[in-house]
Image (cartoon, rainbow, N blue to C red):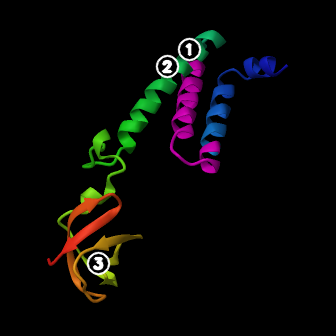
Amino acid sequence: MIQDAFIGLGAWAWIILGVLLIGVELLAPGAFFLWLGLAAIATGLLDAVLDLSWQASALIFAALCVAAVVLGRTLMRPKGQPEAPAEQLNRRGEALVGRVFTLETPIKDGEGRIRVDDSSWRVTGADRFAGARVRVVRVEGSTLVVDDP
């Protein structure tokens, strides 16, 4: 029954499927269903022009899906930001070495805290008052070791 309705609609079935997939993108954003929807619309347009069989339409849709997702991935990748090498994953603290920050809490008995963007980091170093400027010199586990800037 559904198959008969799908085949009976011809090229419009692909266009309707494409619009539905783009609509799903609104509910589950992530720029994936968008490319599948565009591939379905392109398949519908090709089917309208070339009057393809449903088997040929399905194969064209599959090929266009792969091409659209690959194209979409290259277009959506942030420019100027290379992908992080695997050895740098989960080593966010090492990126802070050499940077200067303001103490959020004073360093008492060798321990304090700094704020970096939206996170708070534990720091160790010589005792200093809150608001003092410190430079991160190294990382020990999840603790930053600081010194004078």
The residue at the point 32 percent across, 52 percent down is 91
Q: Is residue 48 visible?
A: yes
Determine whether label 2 and label 1 are within 8 Å by CB: yes
**Residue 9, image quadrant:** top right
- Locate the C terminus and report the quarter of the image it occupies: bottom left
Cα distance, mark 2 to mark 1? 6 Å
Q: Secondary structure at mark 2?
A: helix
Q: Is 49 situated above or below 80?
A: above
- Locate the N terminus and report the quarter of the image it occupies: top right
Q: Earlier in the sequence, mark 3 or mark 1?
A: 1
Cα distance, mark 3 to mark 1? 66 Å
Residue 58, percent from left and from top: 60, 16
Mark 3 or mark 2, whichever is nearer to me: 3
Q: Of 80 and 8, which appears nearest the observer?
A: 80
- Tell me, for residue 14, which label it has, or none: none
Q: Of 29 and 113, which appears nearest the observer?
A: 113
Residue occupied by mark 2: 63
Identified by mark 3, the residue type is Gly
Q: Secondary structure at mark 3?
A: loop
Q: Is 16 situated above or below 136?
A: above
Determine whether label 3 and label 1 are within 8 Å by CB: no
Q: Of 121 and 81, which appears nearest the observer?
A: 121
Residue 56 is left or right of residue 123, and the answer is right
Q: Earlier in the sequence, mark 3 or mark 2?
A: 2
Residue occupied by mark 3: 110
Identified by mark 2, the residue type is Ala
Residue occupied by mark 1: 59
Identified by mark 1, the residue type is Leu
Residue 117 is left or right of residue 57, and the answer is left
Q: Secondary structure at mark 1?
A: helix
